[in-house]
Image (cartoon, rainbow, N blue to C red):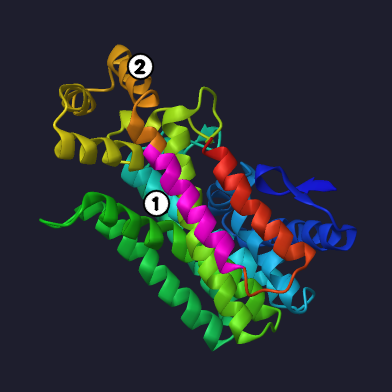
Amino acid sequence: MTVVGPFGLSVRDQALEADVQAGLVAVEEGLLEATKSEVPFITEAAQHLVRAGGKRFRPLLVMLSAQFGDPYAPGIVPSAVVVELTHLATLYHDDVMDEAAVRRGVPSANTRWGNSVAVLTGDFLFARASQILADLGPEAVRVQALAFERLVTGQILETAGPQDGRDPVDHYLDVLGGKTGSLVAVSCRFGAMMSGADETVVDVLTQYGERLGVAFQLADDVLDIASDSDESGKTPGTDLREGIPTLPVLRLRERAARLGLAEDIALCELLDSDLSDDARHAEALRLLRAHPALEQARRDTVRYAKEARAALAPLRECDAKAALVELCDAVVHRAG
């Protein structure tokens, strides 16, 4: 049993392990090749986050999903490069929007070179992803275009906020389905599709990826509050300090509105205050960690992970399916 990929995923079959490891190595090489430019400065900026590392969660899903067809089909590695380039491009843009100073343990591109360079570098990565995609055929282009539309729509909905009368939690889950679930779903879809798997298998894995993607982000929401160390890849309470309304905060506000308890209302007021103050920030973290809203967010994470696991039921039993199931368990474990 060998550990590969994010969360310490255990792969029990040596042949599967070899396929996954070889695929991820090839993806890494493909990412470096795709981010090269004749202009050295562009290469430096485009490879900034590639070289900083990352979980390569989406390429891993491409490799595992390809096991339901021909895992050596020529389109598998390029499609994994496409989804990871797209993901990286969104990180450049997100850091500008969030005014983030650090990404993956290194200064963000906007901190190092300014917002304009960061945005344009993200655009460069999108362009390179599109070039690779064009060689994978019109269906791949269509799938990616629809996913990208959903991703951008999710980002816009997050920026705009819920419309009057819309439940903020439902709105937030829709945002995550677009921002995160769409690209994770495409990762599974590409792996199965490029491997020549049956259409029913492609659909099953796409549904699995959608739910797993949301669970993955919800686990990050919980970690931002609950972690004592840098488990989530950023300092605990970062979203809280920046006023980003993640699920534990939304569940708190929902409870405050429903029950009207003085302590809930007081905590909401604390969250609405200036959390750049270290003492206020620490107090807000302490109170949220002990609040029922955090446990409710954990239950939401578990629910989506269970839905992802249930979606796999129609697939034949095999080591790849077992690994996909284990990813659901790993996401839940991250959330505590």
Looking at the image, do the residues carrying marks 1 and 2 touch, with CB atoms under 8 Å apart?
Answer: no
Instruction: Find the residue positioned furthest to the left.
Output: 164
Asked if residue 297 is among those painted magenta in the image, a careful observer would answer yes
Asked if residue 245 is among those painted magenta in the image, a careful observer would answer no
- Residue nearest the viewer, comparing 221 with 190: 221
Q: Which residue is mark 1?
A: 93
Residue 18 versus residue 199 in the image, above or below: above
Instruction: Find the residue positioned furthest to the front.
Output: 259
The location of residue 312, given as percent across then percent down, is 61, 68
Q: Which kind of residue does numbered mark 2 sit on? A: Ala
Q: Judge whether residue 117 can be spotted in this image.
A: no
- Residue nearest the viewer, comparing 174 with 306: 306
Q: Which residue is mark 2?
A: 282
Q: Residue at x 66, y 85 (%)?
A: 198
Q: Is residue 14 left or right of residue 314?
A: right
Say which quadrant the C terminus sits in: top right
Q: Is residue 29 left or right of residue 124?
A: right
Badge 1 crowding class, 10 Å Cα cut-off, few under 14, some 14 to 19, many 20 or more, is many
Element type at mark 1: helix
User: What span is colored magenta in the figure?
Assistant: 296-312
To which quarter of the image does residue 256 belong?
top left
